[in-house]
Image (cartoon, helix red, strand yellow):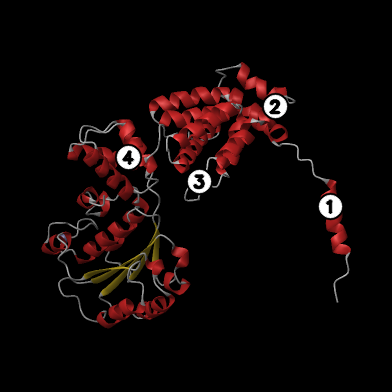
Amino acid sequence: MTTQVYYRKWRPLSFSQVVGQEHVTTTLRQSTKQGRVSHSYLFCGPRGSGKTTSARILAKAVNCLDLQDGDPCNACTICQTINDGRFMDIIELDAASNRGIDEIRDIREKVNFSPVQGSKKVYIIDEAHMLTDAASNAFLKTLEEPPGHVIFILCTTEAQKILGTIVSRCQRYDFRRIPSDLINQRLEEISKEEGVAADTDALRLVSRYSAGSLRDAENLLEQLAVSYSEGVGIKQVEELLGLGHSERWLDLVTGLLTGDASGALGVINQAAWDGTDLRQLHRQTLELMRSAMLLQWGSGGPSGPETPVDLPEETLTQMKQLVSQAPGWRIIRALKLWGEVNMRYDAPSTLPLELAAVEICDYEASAASAPAVQSQPAAAPAPAPAAPRQPPSRQAPPSARAPEPRPPARRAPAAAQRDVPPMP
Ligand SMILES: [Zn+2]
């Protein structure tokens, strides 16, 4: 489904409406306000973070007849023409589909013509890193001597792929991944306006799943609203995303962090049997284990601010309970080993997950030789916050590192090989 109505309908029309990029929008507003606009910009950042939207707002601001504190007024004839998509002096080029030299030649030929409707002609080049080398070089020539009435805005997710000579001629702005609480806030506003009956936890899951892309989040919300008109709960989100069941993620993490290998293997196999996307299972459980780490070490304390753990209320309670029982070294060990599992295959098998699960859990047996680490937190189910923090972290290195017997035989042949005189 690619209707994207919400995304277009709720697209910000001014800098002040752009979510989570104040460091960029404040500067841009200042520069339009003072009339100190550059002739070329580079907007870098992850997808869905507001680059193209901001480019359009900037294009509108430089043409607006009644600028409001650096923001376009959205009321003058120019702003209205732009918002209706009828403005001829904003030219958008999607370099992902028009990456060749012909498009750039076309720009070079027309760039000298004065704007038709506004005072500035603005070229927005999306996915600018997709331009071919020839096209990039041709474009560079245009950038070197741009006419005064032209502004170029290059948007890209991969700035490192753009010619250094192009980058150095642009004013660069780095967009950030939008924090999930800001995405969540926006989704709540949209749901309210659109009359979508969505649970708080459902929206939070959508926000987290979108990984900093407001566009993805808005599109997901729309799909949910269309697919589940009777109401959107966490179950519906999981169903739409093929996430399996969140209780399952928690069961698996519980197995891993408490050293219950057979429990963990059972969950993995049940998930595979049910057709759950194993990559999602992997990703979501990894996220949960990261939360476990943050709960163990990042929760405020005298040294710094609290790292927020973004989980549904119920899951958070269960995770806190789990963290109070799991030894700190195992959280780290689990995160490392689980994080190393490669799930990039098209149809990943259960084997890599099973292997990692056993590796994480089976340490139990050898850890018995270092009882201090293992028994201490388990003996006190609800220790004071400081109690679990110190002992596991300090004692982690000796216990978490498995003894690695190195076969001495491997050394000898290697050395012998080196001693062989080179063939003539
Ligand atoms: Zn205006």
Q: Is residue 421 above or below residue 187?
A: below
Q: Is residue 382 left or right of residue 173?
A: right
Where residue 182 appears, as percent x and y from the top left, is: 33, 42
Where residue 88 appears, as percent x and y from the top left, is: 18, 70
Residue contact at pointers 2 and 3, CB within 8 angstroms: no
Q: Earlier in the sequence, mark 1 or mark 2?
A: 2
Look at mark 1 in the image and give the residue it sits on: 411
Using the rendered image of the protein, determine whether residue 314 is visible from the camera's viewpoint: yes
Q: Nearer the viewer, mark 1 or mark 3?
A: 3
Q: Is residue 406 above or below residue 365?
A: below
Q: Quadrant of ligand 1?
A: bottom left
Q: Earlier in the sequence, mark 4 or mark 2?
A: 4
**CA–CA distance between discs 4 and 3?**
20 Å
Secondary structure beneath label 2: helix
Residue contact at pointers 4 and 1, CB within 8 angstroms: no
Label 4 sits on what residue type?
Leu
Q: Is residue 35 left or right of residue 49?
A: left
Query: What is the number of the mark on residue 240?
Result: 4
Secondary structure beneath label 3: loop
Q: Is residue 325 left or right of residue 409?
A: left
Look at mark 2 in the image and give the residue it sits on: 365
Q: Earlier in the sequence, mark 2 or mark 3?
A: 3
